[in-house]
Image (cartoon, rainbow, N blue to C red):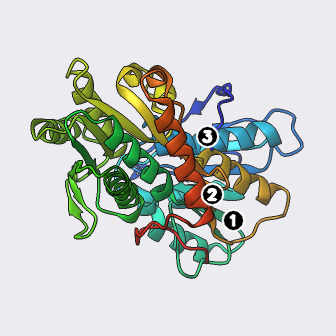
Amino acid sequence: MVSGRRRRRPVKKYVRGLAIVGAVTLAVAACGSKPAEDSAGGSANKDFKACMVSDSGGFDDKSFNQTSYAGLQAAVKDKGLTEVKAESKSDNDYPTNMTAMVQAGCKVIVSVGFKLEDATDKAAQANPDIKFAIVDSAPAKPITNVKPLGFNTAQSSFQAGYLAAAMSKSGKVGTFGGIKIPPVTIFMDGFAEGVRYYNTQKSKNVQVLGWDDAKQSGLFTGDFEDKAKGQNTAQNLITQGADIIFPVAGPAGLGGLQAAKASNGKVNAIWVDTDGCESAAEYCSVLITSVKKGMDVAVQDAIVSVVDNKFDNSQFIGTLENGGTSLAPFHEFDSKVPAELKSELDQIKADIVSGKITIASKAQPKAS
């Protein structure tokens, strides 16, 4: 799960145009990023470069890029490594940024997000001596030097759906995504299944707006960056009667939180990827909880495995059982969530872990 320990962020040295990393010159004119390097001082591992390429949401997305980057920072600090990173401004930057990291002499490169799969695979196949890890990837046959880091967020989203259904006063809850890809729809699937389970258990009829998991169709903003689209999409759901919003859209999803906050207490939300009360504290007053992905711990472990010569390419899958995904604390809603409901959520977790509850989402990652 996402660590609650606060980490000091090292001072970054940003280089514009051409970035000199060690003795290597990076040509980044076509790149949407500003590659940056951290010195590891006198550490014995200072020549070991641990690198990361973000997706287009950027490292300060208050979501999965930011959480993954925290894992890189932790590994750099704990092992005394040198950090190099490239922030993508658009999908077109992925190949260029990946090439820049290869040219920088990186020993391990972590790519953040399903959308970097193609660029990661091509770089890994062309550079077998470099180790790679990719967040939100679950290939059928992992490349020898690529560690896939997947998360079964359908499990914790199932809990979130049950919670939302129980807390809704209007009998309608809503969700929307950024782009229709498995790392997004897996949340929406689990959420819808959790609402349905609540209805079955309680003989209720809470409706899910914005996603039909049977038809795999619903509302998407079309990107992860446009907060205005996120706010408009959330407002559309609110207009239809939804009083709890579950945005799965990275920074665009923050627009959904804006819509909830603007309702003056009528609408609340559940965040994804990281504890929203920590990453987007300005919206904590409307956040019942968050569906967390332990990307920081998974990224840190992957990097450390390379440093310690223990790397393998087996698929990592974060689950409720291993703490790789979980519900965040209720924070300001702790007194508003009934004790009985909290117990029911704990039982749902136990039943998912034991297999008593089976989640149907086809987006769930499977061990390779």
Tag 1: amino acid:
Lys
Which residue is located at x 24 percent, y 45 percent? 174
Q: Is residue 63 left or right of residue 318?
A: left
Under tag 2, what secondary structure? Answer: strand
Q: Residue placed farthest to the bottom in the image?
A: 141
Quick one: label 3 or label 1, which is nearer the N terminus?
Answer: 3
* Residue identified by numbered label 3: 2
Q: Quadrant of the C terminus?
A: bottom right
Tag 3: amino acid:
Val
Q: Is residue 22 left or right of residue 290?
A: right
Which residue is located at x 26 percent, y 69 percent? 214
Distance from disc 2 to disc 1, alpha carbons, whole Å, reads 6 Å
* Residue identified by numbered label 2: 109
Under tag 1, what secondary structure? Answer: strand
* Residue identified by numbered label 1: 131
Under tag 3, what secondary structure? Answer: loop
- Give x and y (percent) for residue 116: 45, 62
Assess disc 1: are there few (<14), some (14-19) or many (≥20) residues with their C-alpha within 10 Å of its C-alpha.
many
C-beta proximity under 8 Å, tags 3 and 1: no
Distance from disc 3 to disc 1, alpha carbons, whole Å, reads 24 Å
Quick one: label 2 or label 3, which is nearer the N terminus?
Answer: 3
| Number of dots carrying numbers | 3
Q: Is residue 62 left or right of residue 309?
A: left
C-beta proximity under 8 Å, tags 2 and 1: yes
Tell which tag, 2 or 3, sits nearer the viewer: 3
Tag 2: amino acid:
Ile
